[in-house]
Amino acid sequence: MSTLSRRNFLKYLAGTAPAAALTGSAAASLLSSCKPVPEGTPEGSQMTLRQNPNTGDRVSLLGYGMMRLPMLPEGTPEDPQTGPFDQEMINRQVDYAIEHGVNYFDTSPVYCRGLSERCTGIALKRHPRDKFFIATKLSNFGSDQWALEPSQAMFENSLKELQVDYIDYLLLHSTGGGGRDPETGENLSGLEVCKRRFIDNGLMDWLVEQKEAGRIRNLGFSWHGDYRAFEYLLQLHDEGRYHWDFVQIELNYLDWFYANEINGGNVDAVTLYGELHKRGIPAVIMEPLLGGRLASVSDEVATELKQRDPEATIASWAFRFAGTPEGVLTVLSGMTFMEHLEENVRTYSPLNPITEEDHDFLMHIAELIYGQKEIPCTACQYCMPCPYGLDIPGIFTHYNRCIREGNTPQSSGSPTFRRQRRAFLVGYDRSVPRLRQANHCIGCNQCAVHCPQQIKIPRELRRIDEYVEKLRREGGPL
């Protein structure tokens, strides 16, 4: 793809292959389609709402992701019902969100040690049912859950934990993720696992029955990994076998054109979005900050963002980008802290859409970030636990942080080498215990098949270990 096409949002959508179904007029409307829906807006709230064309739901553009919930202070005894999670703080943040117009809450049976649905249910039960929409998932990742009965039991348990009679938005979870054949132990493609988890076992037919019975209002899927699974599920939609009311995809200004280049095998967000848009399928957006990476950028990038708009926060640029395209129903954010919630509410109350000039600028910012060669880990923990005890997200987080802070020295002749070397190595030992560092990886690849970003984890761990050993050999004592 040429530099010109990277820098021209409207022309790309109007005239290139992934979005070829968008007419010129449809493409031109994308940047002007984000007006708030006035009806149903809570008194005193200016939260931008988007209307679901399937149900008429007026959904807040900011969605609350319940994947990283507030924890109890260190040393506080765990609660027998909600474990280490601070239910009082969760209640306070949910109350604030609803008061300020947020009405979409996204959870899963596997989030927060399996307690996210319970904590979410407790917090939302205190509010009228018509004040919120609940999204949860069929997270039947384990091969022992691929049969119909365990998956049905998971759905029933979600209703119980959430304390509701119906789910507003139910997703088939991470449909492109790979796995292992329970009988042979062979690695299976994301497409094959998708078919086994949801189609071949009759689960989708059963879910359609639950939707017809009113126990599910909207049925969709989230996708990571094998693009063939994404294409296969959309083919089922096109053939009329199943109807997708919404689809959850990763979309941010770095992944818009660079997802594949950052990590071969990923699919650029412009392609995913274009396939949904031409079918009129509403998009739910995950990873608008790419696991926090777009909120914690290098000094060089931060300086450019601040020069363009001194009043805007670094994160608000990414949220505005994710919320601007036509057909985006809601943008999820895992808001562990109240200040994150407050900031994101301000960004979307109401949304100031990204202009064409803003888009060109953010594509320039994406080029800068891409050039820094960070590992696209979002710390989602899907790769964990490692059977050999490695702290994979911790290793990648430290490495990326050092890149952003300029502490990855390359030449021992540099005048800053000693300082940067010490910062990297001392920080590594403090962040990741020695027995959990990259040198203990044996390359079993059990982690990589579960990675939503399709990171070649053993390769990256080996690269980091070689870099660490190089630093330790050079420069003498720390």
Image: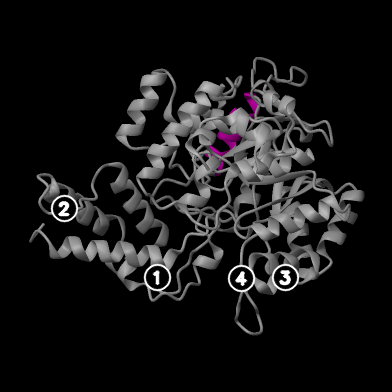
The residue stretch that appears in magenta = 87-100
Residue position marked by numbered label 3 in the rendering: 146
- Sequence-wise, the earlier of marks 4 and 2 is 4
User: Contact (CB < 8 A) between labels 4 and 2?
Assistant: no
Q: Is residue 94 magenta?
A: yes
Q: How crowded is mark 3: few (under 14 residues within 10 Å), some or many (20 or more)?
A: many
Question: In whole angstroms, how far apart are the C-alphas of marks 4 and 2?
Answer: 41 Å
- Sequence-wise, the earlier of marks 4 and 3 is 3
Residue position marked by numbered label 1 in the rendering: 389
User: Contact (CB < 8 A) between labels 1 and 2?
Assistant: no
Q: Disc 1 or disc 2, which is closer to the eye?
A: 2
The amino acid at mark 1 is: Gly
In this rendering, position of residue 153 left or right of residue 123: right
Residue 36's place in the image compared with 222, above or below, is above
Q: Can residue 368 be seen in the rendering of this structure?
A: yes
Q: What element carries label 4?
A: strand
Q: Position of residue 180 (x, y in %)?
A: 61, 75
- Sequence-wise, the earlier of marks 1 and 2 is 1
Question: In whole angstroms, how far apart are the C-alphas of marks 3 and 1?
Answer: 27 Å
Q: Residue at x 71, y 64 (%)?
A: 194
Residue position marked by numbered label 2 in the rendering: 411
Q: Disc 2 or disc 3, which is closer to the eye?
A: 2
- Sequence-wise, the earlier of marks 3 and 1 is 3
In this rendering, position of residue 193 left or right of residue 167: left
Residue position marked by numbered label 4 in the rendering: 179
- Closer to us: 372 or 139: 372
Question: In whole angstroms, how far apart are the C-alphas of marks 1 and 2?
Answer: 32 Å
Q: Disc 4 or disc 2, which is closer to the eye?
A: 2
Q: Which residue is drawn at 63% across and 44% down?
A: 271
Q: Can residue 338 be seen in the rendering of this structure?
A: no
Q: Disc 1 or disc 4, which is closer to the eye?
A: 4
